[in-house]
């Protein structure tokens, strides 16, 4: 068999059409959704991510503000800037691009963002809401993965899902989202023994560790859904994921490519979160 592709570019385009319509409706009421993106330092990868996020906002009718600061910016000055953005009614979402310089406590900065503007879904209030099944902002990458599963009509109830990776950004929230859909979830990580034995039982595998070929064809149950969150470079310098795509596509039932899979969906879900933050903002909600 050859796996069917879950096309993140196509799904993103579809979702962004709806985002643009909702953003236009808000703008017509004088409340254009606004996202502030804060970049500290000159990390090349971060600069690319930030440019893509700002462009996506502009293309979908959202207002975006990019604030760039040198790596020498103090933690106190960054916290002061976050506080000002919290109080700015034109800004509905705040994203501080990670990683931050070593002298800045990233968690302290994340916690300084108002939960009502935490469109990255990293605040402890957002994590807690996800944990107990309450409304809140979901982290964008696992949220995008869930939308991809939804797009193929995949019923997760009773299925066994294996998540490879336990980060706060992807692995842990991914597991909680799958649990909410009544999947049986196994989280694997660097301390897991016999990873292959577990992945061979999985109906769904989400690979999110940032390591090439962590999942190969002999580790996948025929017909399984494989979601590749990884972003790496191969020996030729080309973008690749955590999954050995060439081999796994001949075993899996569905698979996401890299590039063109989860990546576009991550930015799209950031737009969704920003739009929803704008729709829930007190001044907007009162005028509805």
Image: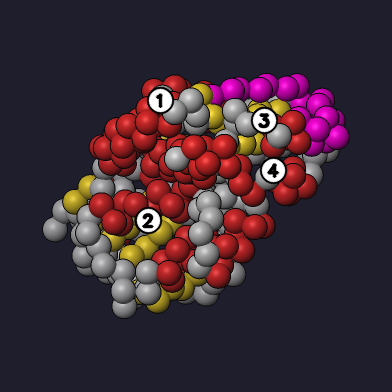
Question: What residue is shown with label 3?
Answer: 88
- Side (left or right) of 234 relative to 225: right
Helix, strand or loop at mark 1 = helix
Can you say whether 146 is above or below 26 in the image? Answer: below
- Give the class, few, some or many, for how many residues have Cα within 10 Å of label 2's Cα (few <14, many ≥20): some
Instruction: Name the quadrant containing residue 42.
Output: top right
Disc 1 residue crowd, few under 14, some 14–19, many 20+, Cα 10 Å: few
Q: Where is residue 84 drawn, in percent x and y? A: 74, 31
Whichever of labels 3 and 2 marks the residue nearer the N terminus, that label is 3
Q: Which is in the foreground here, disc 1 or disc 4?
A: 1
Q: Position of residue 115 (x, y in %)?
A: 64, 49
Judging by the rendered image, the residue that carries numbered circle 1 is: 28
Write the start and end of the magenta stretch as one range. Answer: 64-81
Residue 22 visible here = yes
Name the residue tied to disc 4: 113
Disc on the earlier residue, 2 or 1: 1
Q: In the image shown, does 80 or 280 lie closer to the viewer? A: 280
Whether residue 216 is in magenta: the answer is: no
Residue at disc 4, secondary structure: loop
User: Disc 2 and disc 4: Cα gap in Å?
Assistant: 25 Å
Name which residue lies at 29% across and 56% down. Answer: 150
**Contact, CB < 8 Å: mark 2 with mark 1?**
no
User: CA separation, marks 2 and 1?
Assistant: 31 Å
Report which residue position mark 2 lands on: 146
Q: Residue at x 57, y 37 (%)?
A: 283
Q: Considering the numbered disc 3 on the image, is that residue within a helix, a strand or a loop?
A: loop
Label number found at residue 129: none
Residue 67 versus residue 221 in the image, above or below? above
Tell me the residue at 66%/57% (across/down): 124
Residues at circles 2 and 4 in contact by the CB criterion of under 8 Å: no
């Amino acid at each position: 068999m050859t796996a069917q592709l879950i096309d993140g570019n196509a799904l993103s385009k579809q979702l962004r059409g709806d985002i643009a319509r909702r953003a236009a409706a808000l703008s017509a009421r004088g409340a254009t959704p606004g996202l502030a993106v804060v970049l500290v330092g000159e990390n090349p990868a971060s600069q690319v991510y930030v440019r893509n996020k700002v462009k996506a906002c502009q293309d979908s009718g959202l207002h975006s503000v990019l604030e760039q600061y040198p790596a020498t910016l103090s933690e106190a000055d960054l916290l002061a800037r976050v506080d000002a953005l919290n109080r700015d009614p034109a800004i509905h979402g705040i994203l501080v691009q990670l990683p931050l310089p070593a002298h800045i406590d990233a968690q302290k900065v994340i916690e300084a963002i108002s939960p009502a503007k935490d469109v990255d879904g990293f605040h402890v209030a957002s994590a807690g809401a996800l944990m107990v099944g309450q409304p809140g902002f979901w982290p964008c990458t696992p949220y995008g993965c869930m939308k991809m599963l939804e797009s193929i009509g995949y019923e997760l109830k009773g299925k066994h899902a294996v998540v490879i990776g336990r980060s706060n950004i992807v692995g842990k929230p991914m597991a909680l989202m799958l649990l909410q859909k009544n999947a049986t979830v196994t989280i694997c990580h660097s301390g897991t023994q016999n990873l292959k034995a577990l992945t061979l039982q999985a109906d769904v595998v989400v690979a999110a560790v940032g390591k090439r070929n962590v999942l190969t064809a002999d580790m996948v149950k025929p017909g399984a859904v494989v979601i590749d969150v990884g972003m790496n470079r191969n020996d030729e310098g080309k973008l690749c994921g955590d999954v050995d795509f060439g081999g796994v596509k001949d075993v899996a039932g569905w698979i996401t490519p890299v590039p063109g899979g989860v990546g576009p969906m991550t930015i799209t879900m950031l737009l969704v979160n920003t739009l929803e933050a704008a729709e829930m903002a007190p001044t907007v909600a009162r005028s509805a």
